Amino acid sequence: MRFVIGILTILTTLLIGCKDTNSQLFPGYSYGDFVYLSYNMSEKVSQIYVEKGETVKKGERLVKMDDFPSENAKKIAEKNYRAEVSSLHNMQSGERPEELDLIRAQLERAKAALKLAKSQLERYRPLYSKRVVSEAEWDNFNNDFAQKSAQVKELSRQLVAKNLPARDEQIRNQRSRVESAKLQLDKAEWDLQQTFISAPQDALIYDVIYRPGERPVAGRPIISLLPPENIKIRFFFPESTLAKFHVGMKVKIYSDGVHKTVSGKINYISPQAEYTPPVIYSTSRREKLIFMVEAIPDINQAMNIRIGQPVRVEPVPHE
């Protein structure tokens, strides 16, 4: 019986000793706003360049995804763009030289045939006037000359038209097609760049969720980051001390295992009171209504704090 009484006495003494000796120390805990990096398509993870716990710099490559679909789409977009540019060039410059040379050759043959038809017509004119040639034969010579003359005129006009560029409306339409093809090419190049997942800011690699060969669902996080500025402290104070706190107030943060005090400042005070949670990392805080407060540690000291670690926060009202 005396042994049991002695044990109870020791436990009571320990509990009393655990009570905060400074009423300005408020209990809380650390947490982090994680940055989750994902890929917008369901592709295999090709390569992971980092490991959990490493610190990375902004822009550093973290993950390489399978790039075959994006690479193929880029090649198709490049070919389409070049084809549209070529069509625009043709419209602006007229037909190709080879096609113009073909029309010129046809025109030369037509001119030679016209010359021959004219020669025959002139030779048979006096014979027709003497009625040596029948009227039907004379009509044939006249029709042949007229056809050859019309063919020469047609080919001459074709040569002039082929040398001209396309109409302004057609050129404007083709320019729009070129611009559209260029936008598609830019999008394909951007998609290919996205197969490399890079760090958006300096951060700690908090977790690597997928490994090479795995195929995460589109939008599912592959890596989680914890930037130092995203480490925050949540603590609680009673409703009766609400007027003593304000956003921007400096605080000191104490935690087990960290001998140096971490500085910080309050960045958020909850506008709504809440009831004291069942576990608040302290046996001395028994107020019913409390307010939750967030504080941001100094960025140069933030990495000394571990996520989920119990802390004590001391307001510094005069600094």
Image (spheres, rainbow, N blue to C red):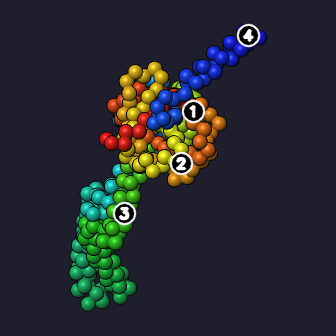
Nearer the observer, disc 4 or disc 1? 4
- From the image, state whether disc 4 or disc 2 is nearer to you: 4
**Comparing labels 3 and 4, the label whose residue is closer to the camera:** 4
Report crowding for label 1: few under 14, some 14 to 19, many 20 or more residues within 10 A (C-alpha).
some
Vertical position of residue 293 compared to residue 88: above or below: above
Residue 124, percent from left and from top? 26, 81
Q: CA distance from mark 3 to mark 2?
A: 65 Å
From the viewer's perspective, tell me whether residue 121 is left or right of residue 297: left
Identified at 55% across, 52% down, the residue is 272
Mark 2 residue element:
helix
Residue positioned most to the front: 2
Q: Which mark is residue 176?
A: 3
Dividing the picture into quadrants, the one containing residue 148 is bottom left
Q: Nearer the viewer, residue 262 or 214?
A: 262
Q: Which one is closest to the eye, mark 1 or mark 3?
A: 1
Task: Please name the amino acid that badge 3 sits on.
Answer: Ser
Q: Can you identify the residue that label 1 sits on?
A: 284
Q: State the SS at label 4.
A: helix
In the picture, the disc for residue 239 is 2
